[in-house]
Image (tube, helix red, strand yellow):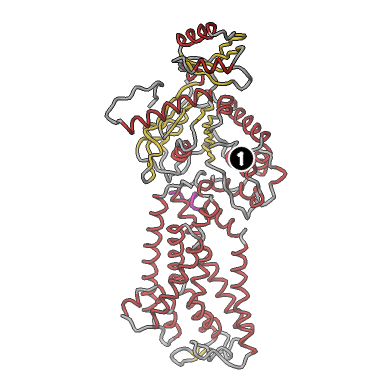
Amino acid sequence: MRFKGIAAVAGAECSKLSAQIKTRVTLAACVVGPFAFAAAMRVQNSLPEDTLFGRSVKESGFALPLVVLGFAALWVLPALTSIVGGDMFSAEDRYGTWKTLLTRSCGRSEVFAGKVAAALGFSLLALGVLAVSSIAAGLLVIGSGPLVGLSGAQLLPSDALMRVTFAWLSVLPPMFAMTAIAILVSVATRNSAAGIGLPVVAALTMQLYALIDGPEIVRQLLITYGFGAWHGLLTQPPYHRPLVYGTVISGIYVVMCLALAFRILQRRDIAA
Amino acid sequence: MRPIAIEAIGVSKSYATREALRKVDLIAHGGEVHGLLGPNGAGKTTLLRVLLGLVGKDAGSVRVFGRDVEAGGALPDGVAGLVDTPAFYPYMSARRNLALLVRLDGKKRTPRGMLDFALERTGLAEHSDVKVAGYSAGMRQRLGLAAALLRSPQLLLLDEPTSSLDPAGARGVCTLVRQLALEGASVLLSSHDMAEIEELCSTLTIIDHGRVVFTGTVDELRSRATANPHVLQTSDDMAARALASRSPGVHVSPADDGGLHVSGTLAAFDTYVVALGRAGIAIRELQRRPRSLESLFFDLTATADLHTREATDHTERPQKPGWELAS
């Protein structure tokens, strides 16, 4: 496997993504969504009080990105990552382009690695755009008032900004894990609907399990555990253990799903 | 001695319960157009897929320009191929599709002249900025050829490249194949169009039911025919055909351009001609014609069919083919 080959495939995938309407619409939604939410919060009288930081959403612009993050972790982030990851491989089956792709100078392992890099890159981009847009929307529409943390301590704007940024960064590992699941489904089923839909369903199922009274160890083995690990960053002092644990669990999901997906693709006959 | 472009030895491949290729040998030399002929389902496309590394083989070895080809590996530089109807990304223009493929070939920037040359050579220059979604099957076929040309092929594997083209487009592809061969490239041309193979190929391999039933030059194939057919003009073709049905060793069929095709052993043919005279049927014209590749192909694949059936029915009985089997 050559780095040059992987970079060529990743570049080609980025070129394809930039030509697709769904990519532009998704990124545009990531930009516009938080501003629309911030505007709605500003004009309405009631607050989303049952949501973490929902009570503070009109007081501090730093609360808004955390409300968005809490909501997005339920299904928006899995959906964002599946839109590209779940279609990355199965689209070649849909268009019948595997034979076109695999009769160039890149081997199958390079194609796999390049596509995975592009899918993970898109997840990173979508998360980054959503995070920046949410923080900007909070600060521009609500203001930069101090944030009251989960342990009741007031956080100065600079401290709050840093913690909010880290909170968004902390969901990157579970988001990558969701991307890996989407890739696995996409490779195994060769079906884009399954590739995009199943990871979202899986994420919702995991979220539901988190609400029922099951064994804690099972809860901790779910990807969704990592999606909530940022709560520890908003306490005084910060509590990092769930974050580390969620990252390790997400890493295991990434390695296992990608290894399985690679094996399936490598052994496949491109016969249709 | 010309270099060996493709060397496939003992290649076998099965899909579930179906044997697609059975110990297939194929050798094609540099600078020649090698035909791969066979009826639908014979295994031509599977063999091309194995040669391109799209499908893994169960047994045998494949070398292209001396390099082993394994499924999943990168295609060697200078090798290009089209399998089935070429497919592209429909939401992008032809030019953008080609630029993307050039990128996959390891070239960071696409020289505009290179794309223009490939598009012009395949007659797509005028439609190069149109999204591929609006392309006809024939245009996609030509775009596939353009994509192949971008690899500056020294070996080009083509799977029925004229199947979706109109006569003018098919003629263009034939001209292109000839030009590439003149420039020193090797072409493996899979087709079931005998006229196309006869026109373009210097050597050919015929496969049927996944087995090679002939490999060699067209002239060698002709020389292996049991007897060249005669074209016969008689005073009463109906009566002549009726007489043939009672004459062992000869086969008579109507010729496309009038008269009758007569084939069989020379002794049987002599007996038949004498019988015609005795029956009062005058012979107005008698010509000996070289057999067309098409009739030889049908004989060959029919023989293979027969042997396949016999082998299935009586596996213990040794086979005695009418044609020498190449593998």
Quadrant including the C terminus of chain B = top left
Q: Which residue position holds label 1?
A: B164
Count numbered badges in the picture: 1
Q: Residue furthest left?
A: B316
Between B74 and B166, the residue placed more toward the observer is B166
Of helix, strand and loop, which mostly describes the magenta segment? helix
Taking the spot 57% from the left edge, 91% from the top edge, the residue there is A59
Looking at the image, residue A20 lies above or below residue A240: above
Between A185 and B152, the residue placed more toward the observer is A185
Q: Residues within 10 Å of mark 1 (few under 14, many from 20)?
A: some
Magenta stretch containing residue B124, yes or no?
no
Q: Quadrant of residue B57?
A: top left
Taking the spot 63% from the left edge, 20% from the top edge, the residue there is B257
Q: Where residue B29 sits: x, y (%)? A: 48, 26
In the picture, measured across the screen, residue A253 lies left or right of residue B160, that is: left
Q: Where residue B263 sits: x, y (%)? A: 50, 16
Between B321 and A47, the residue placed more toward the observer is B321
Q: Secondary structure at mark 1?
A: loop
Taking the spot 45% from the left edge, 25% from the top edge, the residue there is B300
Q: Quadrant of residue B158?
A: top right
Q: Quadrant of residue A219?
A: bottom left
In the picture, measured across the screen, residue A234 lies left or right of residue A215, that is: right
Q: Which chain is mark 1 on?
A: B
Q: Where residue A75 sits: x, y (%)? A: 49, 75
Looking at the image, residue B151 lies above or below residue B272: below
Question: In the image, which residues are magenta?
Answer: A1-6
Q: Amino acid at mark 1?
A: Ser
